[in-house]
Image: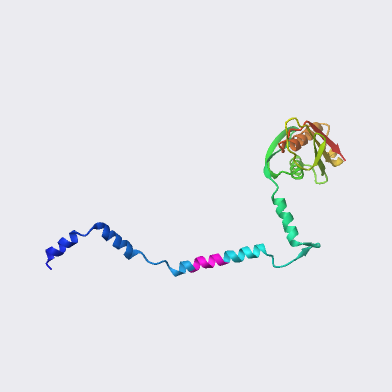
């Protein structure tokens, strides 16, 4: 074959055929190491899931199984948390601060105490919400049009030790604003009881 004939044959080759041939040449089978790596990761994941689902021991804490204690902790985590406005006194003026807290009356009350500089000896005894005469203790209630809500807050009487003649009304008002404001209920009546 002459040189000219060879160049003529080369010129007639389809460029798409050349590209397909290049792709087939450059394509290598997947590495077996990659398959082994994915298999190892899958095995580790299965072992982890089995370890979490089936505890290895039946340890007890104060006579209760550890699994029960663990479930109680998970329940505490499920409590809704949100930004809650806490009212407190600053130079005899009521101001507010927004804190991300669990929506429980105890957490809200403790944050109110802290911001007002009230000691640990003051405690929240109970919060009772009444909806048209039906009582609900330490929980939020659902609201229907025409409902009438009242809230009864009981605290230890040593809170009065933190009330001076100048700040008593404002301090107790900041407590009222805090405890009636974090739920989505509009209260018609608020009662503070010292016990």
Give residue 40's position: percent from left, percent from top: 53, 68
Q: Residue at x 33, y 64 (%)?
A: 26
Residue 168 occupies which quadrant of the picture? top right
Location of the C terminus by quadrant is: top right
Q: Residue at x 77, y 64 (%)?
A: 60
**Residue 161 painted magenta:** no
Left or right of 93, for residue 123: right
Residue 188 occupies which quadrant of the picture? top right
Give residue 14's position: percent from left, percent from top: 23, 58
**Residue 42 painted magenta:** yes
Pick the residue in front: 158 or 143. Answer: 143
Pick the residue in front: 107 or 55. Answer: 55
For the view shown, which residue lies furthest in the right direction?
A: 195
Please tell me whether the stretch drawn in magenta is mainly helix, strand or loop: helix
Give residue 20's position: percent from left, percent from top: 30, 60
Left or right of 68, for residue 33: left
Location of the N terminus by quadrant is: bottom left
Give residue 21's position: percent from left, percent from top: 29, 63
Above or below 148: residue 123: below
Pick the residue in front: 96 or 71. Answer: 71
- Counting labels gives 0
Q: How is the image coloured?
A: rainbow
Residue 9 occupies which quadrant of the picture? bottom left
Magenta segment: 36-43
Q: Residue at x 19, y 59 (%)?
A: 12
């Amino acid at each position: 074959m002459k040189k000219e004939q060879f160049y003529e044959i080369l010129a007639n080759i389809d460029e798409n055929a050349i590209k397909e041939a290049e792709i087939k040449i450059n394509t290598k089978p997947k590495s077996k190491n990659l398959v082994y790596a994915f298999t190892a990761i899958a095995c580790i994941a299965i072992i982890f899931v089995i370890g979490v689902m089936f505890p290895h021991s039946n340890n007890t804490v104060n006579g209760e199984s550890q699994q029960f204690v663990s479930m109680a902790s998970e329940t505490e985590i499920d409590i809704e948390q949100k930004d809650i406005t806490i009212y407190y006194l600053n130079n005899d003026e009521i101001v507010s601060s927004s804190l991300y807290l669990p929506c429980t009356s105890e957490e809200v009350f403790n944050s109110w105490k802290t911001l007002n500089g009230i000691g640990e000896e003051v405690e929240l005894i109970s919060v009772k919400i009444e909806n048209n005469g039906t009582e609900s203790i330490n929980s939020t209630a659902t609201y229907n049009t025409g409902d009438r809500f009242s809230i009864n807050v009981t605290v230890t009487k040593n809170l009065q030790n933190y009330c001076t003649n100048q700040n008593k009304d404002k301090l107790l008002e900041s407590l009222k604003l805090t405890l009636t404001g974090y739920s989505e209920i509009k209260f018609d009546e608020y009662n503070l009881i010292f016990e």
